[in-house]
Image (tube, coloured by chain):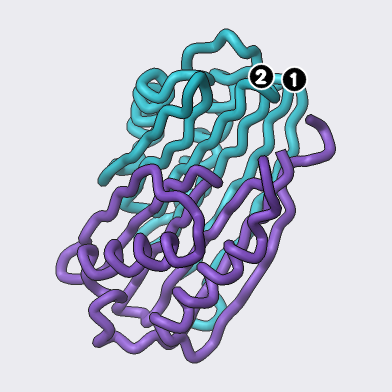
Chain colours: A cyan, B purple
């Protein structure tokens, strides 16, 4: 099961972005961006930390999006993992990753792309 | 925000393991194993593919567990990502990862551990 996993660490995100601090706003953004890419939502879970900060995932037919925000550090980690069962979903995964990054406006980023599965099927 | 992300690809899992094919069984297993480690569940979402296969995540106060199963290929991918905000959670993450692996019984595995965050806070 060939797949691609994009991992981001985003630093210096503006602390007053609602999508960065509130679970309901981040959930709405994530689900909308997933749908915009043409990936398929099959579930989600988001949790609001108090006084701020969010952890959440959107389950995809193609695998998952996971995001964790630490407003006190201006820091976010993001995972977009898609398998390529019927079609190559890498371009959709990259679109999702970059539109989410544009919404949360980090000043500095680290990025890794990891190939998963494939050889031993 | 220092953290550790364990990524597994498990091949040759026995196709008749209920936790491998059914969302309710896999959810129950994952939540129980997370609690056994002392990590903190703050939410979850699991989805049943038909005729078989599961995608799911358990949200943790410490980040997340994500798992995807493809019974038709005997294949599973697993992510255990924990941050180390107040304490070093790596040992708990490894315990969770290995007890889950023992339950799903892969014949062959690939493993990566990725350090996340930390330098640019």
Residue at the far left in the pictured view? B51
Q: Is residue A5 left or right of residue A47?
A: right
Disc 1 target residue: A107
- For residue A12, what is the image quadrant? top right
Mark 2, residue position = A13
Give the mark nearer the N terminus: 2 vs 1.
2
The answer to which of A36 and B96 lies nearer the viewer is B96
Q: Chain of mark 1?
A: A
Q: Residue at x 48, y 12 (%)?
A: A18
Residue at 44% from the left image edge and 57% from the top image edge:
B66
Residues under labels 2 and 1: Cα distance?
6 Å
Q: Kindly give the residue lying farthest to the top in the view shown.
A: A16
- The quarter of the rendered structure image containing the C terminus of chain B is top right
Q: Position of residue B118 (x, y in %)?
A: 78, 40
Please count the marks in the image: 2
* Residue B90 spot, x, y in % from top left: 66, 60
Badge 2: residue crowd in 10 Å (few <14, some 14–19, many ≥20): many
Seen from the viewer's position, the closer of residues B108 and A33 is B108
- The image shows residue B5, relative to residue A27, as above or below, that is below
Q: Residue at the spot x=51%, y=68% of the render? A: B96
């Amino acid at each position: 099961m060939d797949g691609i996993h994009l991992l981001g660490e985003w630093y210096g995100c503006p602390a007053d972005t609602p999508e960065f601090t509130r679970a309901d706003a981040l959930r709405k953004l994530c689900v909308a961006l997933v749908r915009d890419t043409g990936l398929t939502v099959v579930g989600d879970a988001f949790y609001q930390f108090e006084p701020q900060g969010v952890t959440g995932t959107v389950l995809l037919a193609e695998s998952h999006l996971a995001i964790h925000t630490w407003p006190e550090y201006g820091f976010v980690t993001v995972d977009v993992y898609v398998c390529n069962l019927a079609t190559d979903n890498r371009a959709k995964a990259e679109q999702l990753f970059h539109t989410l990054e544009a919404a949360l406006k980090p000043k500095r980023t680290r990025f890794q792309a990891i190939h998963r599965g494939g050889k031993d099927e």
